[in-house]
Image (spheres, grey):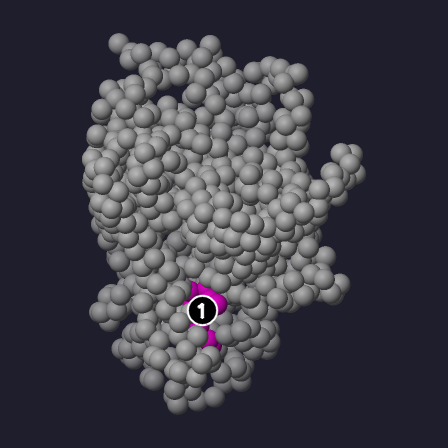
Amino acid sequence: MNFASIQYLTFFCCVFFTYWHLSRKYQNILLLLASWFFYACWDWRFLSLILVSTLIDFVVGKQIHGSNIRSIRRAWLGLSVLVNLSILFYFKYADFFVGSFIELCNTLGFYPSQPTLDIILPVGISFYTFQSLSYSFDIYKKELKPSHSLLDFATFVAFFPQLVAGPIVRAKEFVHQLSTDRQFNGDDFQRGLKRFLLGLFKKAFIADTLAIYLVDPVFAAPEQYSSATLWLAMFGYAVQIYADFSGYTNMAIGSALMLGFSLPENFNFPYLATNISDFWRRWHMTMSRFFRDYVYIALGGNQKGEARTYVNQLTTTMVSGLWHGAAWTFVAWGGIHGILTSSLQFKNRHFKFKMPKIWVVTLAAWAFTQLLVCLAWVLFRANDFDHARVYLQRLFSNESGDSIVMTVLILCAFLSFGVDHLYGWLKERGVLHRYEIPSLVKGGAYALIIIFMFHSIPKEATPFIYFQF
Amino acid sequence: MLSPFLKQILSMKALAPEVYFTLAIWFFCEMFAVFILPFCFSDAFFMSLYMDDKAKISTARFLNNENANIPDSITGWFNKPNEKRKHWVTDQYGSRSANPAVIERNNKTRVIFLGSSMVNGGEGVANNETMSAYLDSETREAFNFASMSYSVDQSLLTYRSKIKLFEPDILVVGIDPTPITGLYNHYIPFKIPEETSMPYLKPRFKLRDDELVEIRPNQNWLKSYLTNDEFHHFLKKNDAYFRDFEQFQSFGFTPIAQGLFALFKRVRSFVSYYYAEGVSDPLLEKVMDTFVMEAAQEGTKVYFAILPNQRMYSWSGIWQFFPDVYQLRVNALGLEGFNTIDIRQTLIDSGYSGNELFHDDEWHYRRLANEIIGEAIKVELNKSENVKL
């Protein structure tokens, strides 16, 4: 069940109107059943994975909390890590590692037979296993007390607005919300509905328009298109993946808000970043936070010398690349970001000169950062290294070829993205607080957006990019 | 008694003013679009919105003879001669036969197929995999003159203008699953809005004093189809589906209006199925009757192959609670004395599943189905005492 579908709207309306007529306990039961139903709509068989992950971490959390002996606490944590990562590795990475091993053998002159695993990837597996795992980690680090209610914990793991593509919510910022009474609040409802509408617009109009009319055709056959078109499609993909994923996040946050829950923000206008570290503070913030806390710091962070800091950074970003998908292109994408982040840190540590804070310098830093980010997206989008090589070669070769007709819809999609980030730019400078737009004008704008979307969203809807992760 | 939650929802203006104004203005836009907008603009304006980019491009290509169908002053369109596509070709007469059609008679029995893309074969099969191809033998030759989206009236006009010349012994005319709608339609996009690849114009017949009167549109109107008032006036007067275009003017621009209207159309369609509308029709019977009479004057016998789509073939699920329109049609046309061939029964007897017989569009036949149908027609023709095969 896709957020940008009539099925989800119907499902959500049913949940919403029933939910606010129930007491807290029954609200949680409804949320749990609705969440399982939501997930079962993709493939009911994989519900068992969520159940296993939930039960293991619920028990593990209690056992860790109940013991003061370090080795026992570690053993229970180890069990949680083993179960969750085994699920993740088997369903997401088994094919990849077996295939890579066989390729390596072939390179070395051995030719083992290729087993056909054909494992189906359960939707959102990377999100809910991490979320469940973070619960055990936080209890282990004594930052959280275990939940006394299996119902509350199961609802936290399966909460449908963020079940399949985040934001990755940590137990300590969500479980307590399940155990407090919730009252319908007109302001939350209004904010939630606006977030949902904004997300729908980003996904259904901006992301899908760019995907269908620009990005997919060009990436499918880069050798046919001119260099200028490849540049345009590369920028188009940068906008598409942002609109797609932040659109989903907006719909998740909006849905949760209408049900009285607050989820963490995931994006903060990432294409306004003026350096690569700044970009990662704005892009997929809950994932960055997860890898910082549970991988980078676990590896020693910046506490074990300069060289080790860079190695830790590189390792963390490569693991986060692998988290995105079971392919070496994702690992390489993570590696590039690791090198860029480490280079920036190296520069800051060893070259203390301050750049003058004038707009030309800021603009140049912004353009350079975004160019690097966009070039790295080519690797992220490519099917394999050969595909990326062909794309990047033609990008810089000034070759002629086919071009994509810049339709009004493509221009509108780019323009809408521009307005979104202009809003972020003005917001960061505090300009927007000076003006109060009347509700009537805002209402009119929203109504027109709804009607505009109705006419302009492509008929061939595409799935959310991050569902595959 | 309203619950506190519902009371809060109803007092939304104070609690959530932006939501309130959004809904209020949206509702106003819906009302404006339904009741006011149609009076503000001309048919030409709405026509430019009704026809999407693909339809506009397809019209231009059609007029430039770049499509697989080219304009025909009598039938509206016909297969482009000597066309070569990935899976199929046409000969110099536009026939899609296993062997090129020839006018000169020989000692073989000549069978000519007419009908829509279901007979023609569509994109999914090669020439030698169409139903007509399976009738070719040492004593018999079969030519396939069916054309995309043809209704029975166009098959009759094709017979008059092109097929008589070939002096066939037998005509096999495909009756597709919706044989009546096309008889009341001139402009294809009005009947099937999503059919953007075939924005063509066809003639139709009207019944006057139990006689067929042909209404033939001017094909040149397509050159200025967006702005030509004469064309729009003609369609308003003669095309039964012009009302769908008028409904688009009211219900095509806002989400709720369009959603509700789509729901209404779905319900209307179910009701028409329930009351078995569309089984037969006086105009259809008259066209078929005329077909048989005119062919008989030339010594040609006409068989009508009643063709099912996949839904009619399976007739399961919710549809089993509705009258079996296919069977009713076979019975009704049989009672009128037409030579009909029950294709569905043949396919059912073969024991194959719907997915094995039909392409993914659930409408066109796969090679296997065409072979079964071809064999069934062969058996039916062999039964005929007048024809020695």
Vertical arrangement, residue B325 with respect to residue B12, above or below: below
Does the magenta-highlighted stretch encompass residue B121? yes
Report whether A169 appears left or right of B192.
left
Q: Chain of mark 1?
A: B
Could you tell me residue A453's position as x and y percent? 54, 36
| Residue at image point 30% right, 55% down | A86
| Residue at image point 52% right, 18% down | B18
Mark 1 — residue? Answer: B124
Does the magenta-highlighted stretch encompass residue A251? no
Residue A383 visible in this rendered orientation of the protein: yes
Q: Residues within 10 Å of mark 1 (few under 14, many from 20)?
A: some
Report whether B290 appears left or right of B344.
right
Tell me which amino acid carries mark 1: Gly
Could you tell me residue B231's position as x and y percent? 64, 45
User: Which stretch appears magenta?
Assistant: B117-127
Which one is in front, B177 or B316?
Answer: B316
Could you tell me residue B372's position as x and y percent? 31, 74
Vertical arrangement, residue A253 with respect to residue A287, above or below: above
Which one is in front, B20 or A264?
Answer: A264
Which picture quadrant has residue A10?
Answer: top left
Residue reaching furthest to the front? A305
Residue A234 visible in this rendered orientation of the protein: no
| Residue at image point 23% right, 37% down | A68
Q: Quarter of the image containing the N terminus of chain A?
A: top left
Could you tell me residue A290's position as x and y percent? 43, 42
Which one is in front, A114 or A208?
Answer: A114
Vertical arrangement, residue A424 with respect to residue A84, above or below: above
- How many numbered marks are there? 1
Secondary structure, mark 1, is loop
Vertical arrangement, residue A196 with respect to residue B89, above or below: above
| Residue at image point 33% right, 46% down | A129
